[in-house]
Image (cartoon, rainbow, N blue to C red):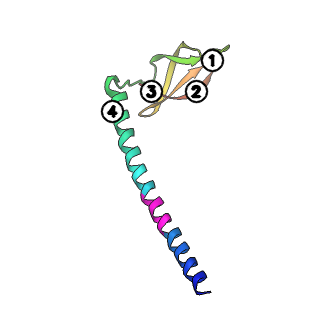
Amino acid sequence: MKLLKQKLKTTYEYVLDLKERLSDTCELAQKELHKVQTKQAKYFNRNTEDRIFQAGDEILVLLPTNSNKLLLQWKGPFQVIERIREMTTKFSWLEEQKLFMQTC
């Protein structure tokens, strides 16, 4: 009986220790992920430039073709109706209005 209690205690301690180690490992992985994401974003954005569209501007949009969603082609020109936020533009699309995120 005494041996069983001692074994249960060590199993309980093992589970607590394992939980703490998993928590520490998860925290370390999140820090490394943030560091790598920052590095990749810096690499990706090194040759980009901000484009600012105003109401009335005409733009071309890169969209999938009707036959193959993986094949893209430029369509337009479309007229910008308004700029919602820094990277969001609303423009006219065949008598209706579409909202698109702008990418550099």
Q: Is residue 84 above or below residue 61?
A: below
Instruction: Report helix, strand or loop for mark 2.
Output: strand
Residue occupying image coordinates x 60% and y 19%: 70
Residues drawn in magenta? 17-24
Residue occupying image coordinates x 34% and y 24%: 49
Instruction: Report helix, strand or loop for mark 3.
Output: loop
Q: Is residue 43 above or below residue 61?
A: below
Label 2 to label 4: alpha-carbon separation: 30 Å
Label 3 to label 4: alpha-carbon separation: 15 Å
Precedes in sequence: disc 2 or disc 4: 4
**In the figure, residue 35 lies in which quadrant?**
top left
Residue under pointer 4: 42
Quarter of the figure that contains the C terminus = top left
Residue under pointer 2: 98
Mark 2 or 4: in front is 4
Does the magenta stretch mainly form a helix, a strand or a loop? helix
Identify which amino acid the numbered label 1 is placed on: Leu
| Most foreground residue, 6 or 84 | 6
* Magenta stretch: includes residue 53: no
